Structures are given as C-alpha cells and as structure tokens.
Image (cartoon, rainbow, N blue to C red):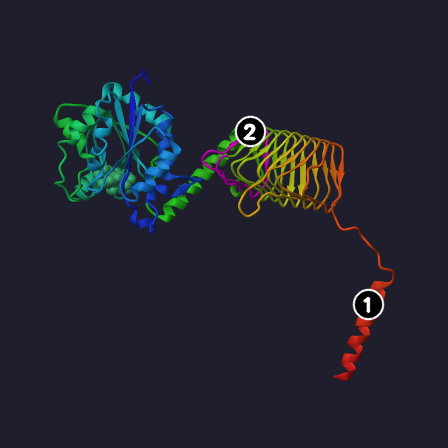
Amino acid sequence: MGGMAVAFIILAAGKGTRMQSDLPKVLHKVAGAPLLIHAMKSGAALEPDKTVIVAGHGGDAVEAVARDWSDDVDVVMQTEQLGTGHAVLQARDALDGFDGDAIVLYGDTPFIQPETLDAMLAARADHDVVVLGFEAADAGRYGRLVMTGNSLERIVEFKDASPAERDITLCNSGVICASSDLLFDLLADVTDDNAGGEFYLTDIIGIARHRGLFATVVNCDEAETMGINSRAELADAEAAFQTRARRAAMDNGVTLQAPDTVYFSHDTYIGADTIVEPNVVFAPCVTVENAAHIRAFSHLEGCHVSRDSVVGPYARLRPGAELAEGVKIGNFVEIKNAVLDAGAKVNHLSYIGDAHVGARSNIGAGTITCNYDGVFKHRTTIGEDVFVGSNTMLVAPVMLGDESMTATGTIVTRDVPDGDMAVGRARQENKTGFARRMFQKLKSKKTNAAKGA
Ligand code: UD1
Ligand code: CA
C-alpha cells in the first residue's frame, strides 16, 4: 500500500459476560484458534509495523496467547473498561512516534478479510477517517452510520439514536482507520456524555467533521463483521468458518465426499486431487500434499502427509507425524512424533511414537513402540526394508537395522543388526492330550455338582 506504515490496535479488554465463562472472550476458539488470533492474522496479512493488543479481563492469559503467536506485539492493559474510545487511547504510548495509519480491530470479530483492510487503506487517500460499514439484515443495537452522499457525518450509537436514525440500516462494524496521530488527537476530545456513559470511539467521526476533516465508509459483507458475544454466536461462527473452508478446499481441487462432516482448522492446507472421505477432523497445523487419500473417521493434528499416502479409516496422526510419499497408515493406528519414510506401512492396530521408520518397512499388526518409561521418552529407529512381525513390542531406546526382521510376538529390548531376525518369546510346548483330559474332568465335576443339589 504505497509504503505507508500501518499499525493495528486490537481491542480485547472486554469480559464477554454472555459467554458465561472463566476464559476471556477473545480466547474462545473458532477453527482451533482463539478469536484473538483470527483478528491478529487478518492484520498480519498487511505486514504491519506495529500491532498493539488492548487487554483487560484475563489480561495475562490474553497476553500469553498473543505473544505465543507473535513475538512482535505490544500488549497494553486497560484496567477499567470505560468504552471503545478509552480502550484505543490505551495504545497511545505504544504508538508514540509511529508515523502511519492505525486501524482499530476488535478481538472478538474474527472474519475481517485482509482485502477489506486494503480497501480501507486505499480510501484513506482522500479521506481522513475511514470506517468499515455493512448493510445489516437486522440492525439491532449496532451503531448507525449517518451519511450525506459519500461523506460519513457521524456515528450514532443505538442507545442515543433518534427513531429516524434507528431506521438507518448501514451499520458500524467497529473497524476504523485514520493516521495514528489524528486518531489520538480526535480521541482527546471524546467525552462520556452519552446514554451509555462511555467514551465512544465512534464519536471521533462527528469531531473530525466539526474540524472540517473528511470521513467515509468502506462496505463489506455482514458475514465478515460477525462478532462473538455468546456460545451460540461462537457456534454460528464455527459453522460459518467451516462452510467457507469446505468450499475453499473444493475450489482448490480437493474432493470432499461429505463436506458437512469434515472439519478444518484455521491453518489447514490440503493439496489438489487429495480425497477426503466422510467424518475427518483436521486439528491445527496439518498439511496434506496433492493426491493423498484421507479415509473416513481419521483425526489429524500437527502432521504432514505427502502425496500418494493413504491414512485411515480410523487413523490418528498426532503432532510430529511426518509421512513421506506413498506411506500407508491403516485402521486403529496412532502415530506421534514419528517420521515414516517413503512406502512404509503401518496397517493395523499399532502405536508408533518417537520413532523413525525407514523406507518400505512394514510394521505388523499390533506393534507398539514402548516409548515411555514413566519419566522419559525414548526413540525407536527402524531401518529400511524391515519386516516387523505382528505384536512386536519395541522397548525404546532400540534400533532395528536395515533388512532386519522380528518374529511375531517378540519383545525387542536389544538392537537388531542389519539383516538379522530377532525372536524373543517363550518357546511353545504341546502337552499331548492334556486339553481333552482336562475338559472331561471339569465336565464330570459339573454333572456331579448338579446331582448333589
Ligand atoms: C461497538 C460500536 C458500535 C458498533 C459495534 C459493532 C462503539 C461505541 N460502538 O458497540 O457502533 O456497531 O461495536 O460490533 O464503539 N472493548 C474494550 N474496552 C472497552 C470497551 C470495549 O476492549 O472499554 C472491546 C470489547 O471487548 C469488544 C469491542 O471493544 O471486543 C467492542 O466493544 P462493545 O462494548 O462490544 O461495543 P458495542 O456496544 O458492541
Ligand atoms: Ca459488541
């Protein structure tokens, strides 16, 4: 945007009383990410020079989440919530000396698109203040935008609005843009002399016009400005997100056999020609390359699936699962913090954790990496072209060499050299006629007991 510096001020001090929660409202999640992170991501897409979060209720928790996501944020505290204008003023010191545009976002409004913010910055070329507005299906208690032609004259809060003003359907989203200096200058004139007894950010428009400055509105879809105030609205936001994510995946060439049953996270990436069967959950941090196949009832989180791999049905990929090309993970298999090289197979009923499985190795049914001794986690390293027999217990730390093998039911406690076979199980003995004799004895005991009764 013409090199003009941009800062974001994200308001996140409110309690969110209607959430009925101990958690600050902006930390409730949609698509696996706190609402605040959605707002931060919208801003981050414009590569801002500064991002200031105004926290209050649960401020420490809000700060921790914000810093966890970005080490380039300022967090300021608004100890008393005296209104949106007062909230923005708390960012003044953090933006001292900043020369550029400031955009105010709300931490509870997750779906503002970067393109919309770009449009607001563009509109700043010939207006001092730009407000993001929308035509509301039900204007309810939103602030109303009072226009004269293309000029925004003032914003009137519902509580303070006349009946005629309440008839206006063009509403204030809350997103506002002005040069940082002007924003704080205008805010200095805002008072709490209104029906709410609050310092309204929205009053800066009337003040700007009074000074002969110019304000206008950029419009967006109502869906984009959706704010979350209750659990029901949180669920609505989740549903809206999922609808869009499913549509976007299909537009990008992903087959969803039953789109309504597939759940995406805010950061899910799936390549073209991948097929996703019904009832699959993509928790955060999942990337799937092209032409993979994710079968029904699988749960994936923090993992990477390469092309031509097949996952599921009923598979669980946990954080750190790295599947190279053409890997097969079958039913009731759990993979955690493990790299599987090309063509490796774990087809049935296994747990592979803290491990490396070499190319083309086959892990038999029921195999488990015993990675945890109750205190420490240990690694299992399996070479290339290894055949691990069914029900092998790999007691880590342990290593299976290339082209080695384990016999079914083996408990592997020592490394197996390349090309060797490990057998570690009790030797079988057959006791001649024992079973038949024992059953006869037991049956006659039962008959005698019945007679006696
Ligand atoms: C605000 C706008 C209204 C707009 C609506 C859109 C004002 C005066 N009104 O009303 O025109 O239509 O949003 O949703 O700006 N917050 C703080 N500190 C405070 C007060 C609020 O951080 O002291 C935060 C809240 O946590 C919330 C956001 O600012 O995320 C908006 O505050 P809220 O009280 O919900 O404003 P509304 O009354 O909805
Ligand atoms: Ca609100």
Residue 187 sits above or below residue 227 on the image: above
Give the mark nearest the N terminus, 2 or 1. Answer: 2
Residue 282 sits above or below residue 435 on the image: above
Furthest toward the bottom, the residue is 452
Q: Quadrant of residue 378?
A: top right
Q: Is residue 447 magenta?
A: no
Dominant SS in magenta: loop
Q: Which quarter of the figure is the N terminus placed in?
A: top left
Kindly identify which numbered label has been placed on residue 271. Answer: 2
Report x, y in % for residue 263.
50, 41
Task: Name the residue nearer the viewer: 85 or 411.
Answer: 411
Q: Is residue 331 visible?
A: yes
Q: Which quarter of the figure is the C terminus placed in?
A: bottom right
Q: Residue at x 23, y 25 (%)?
A: 178
Task: Name the residue nearer the viewer: 301 or 131.
Answer: 301
Amino acid type at circle 1 is Met
State which region is magenta.
262-285
